[in-house]
Image (spheres, helix red, strand yellow):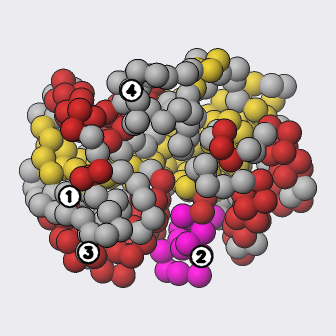
Amino acid sequence: MFAPKLVPGDEIRVIAPSTSMIILKEAQSELAVKRLTDLGFRVTYGKNAEAHDEFFSSSISERIEDLHQAFADPNVKGILTAIGGYNSNQLLNYIDYDLISSNPKILCGYSDITALQLAIYQKTGLVTYSGPHFSSFGMKHGFEYTMESFLDAVTNDAPYEINPSLNWSDDPWFLDQEDRVFHEQKGYEILRNGEAEGKLIGGNLCTMNLLQGTEYLPSLKDAILFIEDDEETHSRSFDRDLQSLLHLPEASSIKALLIGRFQKASNITDEALRKIIMSKEELKDIPVIANVNIGHVCPFATVPIGAFASVKAFDGNAEIFIEQKEK
């Protein structure tokens, strides 16, 4: 089930189901609002978006209230999460999934928000979007690719491609907007050749694994699995987290694997990643593409969880097409 696409004049509600937006710098929030307003959208905020406790989050009841109000309000057409964090999975038992199913809306964010997105898709069938937070729109430089992909995903029904960006950056832009370092992007890294079609399922890998054994993890049957992780991961933790997913009963029918570019602090080199992937017998017959523009390295694409996609990887050339339809 796809929510109606966004059009100029629509209201976008900002909520904080993980870390409070109180941590955002004022200039960052102002730029985010300006960008969204320049696109023709109207930005509003959940009542508790800036509420916070000693963990820089807010209570479950406050976060649930904002989530439910955003879906229940007929004026709200899109929902952006403020930022990621660690605890959005606390909300899953308290969500009114019938309310969401009856009021389908675009929900976009990434990182810790993966738990919320996968649970909503699994319980309601609503396609959710792994893409920029509200805070992401406050990035002063190098945001063009991210913006274009977001608009491709949430404002029209046409198929679109996730192409490699011309460059990428891993610096803490939120600390210093001017001292930025961009590296040339030399295309995606093909670890295994192949061609596949399937349903996009994925997001932040370590967050996705929090849902194993629960009622909130979507099936991996015939999935194009896309995963990424942040600087807290490293070669050994990524290896075991991926292996854990591959042990799931339906993982044997995964059609393709897309891996987001790792942050430098993870110390996962292309060589290390290739060795990890080559050790997985479960992946030997499917296309595997790495350094894809998804996740914590900027810029990044918006990926609709639950949408149909096709992947080709041959002779150093990779194609990733999002069909904007359900399988």
The stretch drawn in magenta includes residue 168:
no
Circle nearer the viewer, 2 or 3: 3
- Nearer to us in this view, 44 or 140: 140
Q: Which of the labelled discs sits on residue 59, or is there none?
A: 3
User: Which type of secondary structure does the marked residue at label 4 adopt?
Assistant: loop
Whole-Å distance between the Cαs marked 2 and 4? 38 Å
| Circle 2 Cα neighbour tier, 10 Å, few/some/many (<14 / 14–19 / ≥20) | some
Query: Which badge, 1 or 3, is on the more N-terminal residue?
Result: 1
For residue 15, what is the image quadrant? bottom left
> Which comes before the other along the chain, label 2 or label 4?
4
Residue at mark 2: 212
> In the image, which disc is placed on residue 313?
none
**Which residue is the site of mark 4?**
177
Mark 1: amino acid: Ala
Marks 1 and 2 sit apart, C-alpha to C-alpha, by 29 Å
Asked if disc 3 and disc 4 are in contact, CB closer than 8 Å, the reply is no
Question: In the rendered view of the protein, which quadrant contains the N terminus?
Answer: bottom left
Q: Residues within 10 Å of mark 4 (few under 14, many from 20)?
A: some
Q: In screen coordinates, is 307 left or right of 168?
A: left
Does label 2 or label 3 sit earlier along the sequence?
3
Q: Do the residues under discs 1 and 4 have CB atoms within 8 angstroms?
A: no
Which amino acid type corresponds to the residue marked 3 in the rendered image?
Ser
Is 86 situated above or below 59? above
Q: Secondary structure at mark 1?
A: loop
- Label 1, on which residue? 49
- Tell me what residue is drawn at x 16 percent, y 57 percent: 46
Marks 1 and 2 close (CB-CB < 8 Å): no
* Amino acid at pointer 2: Gln
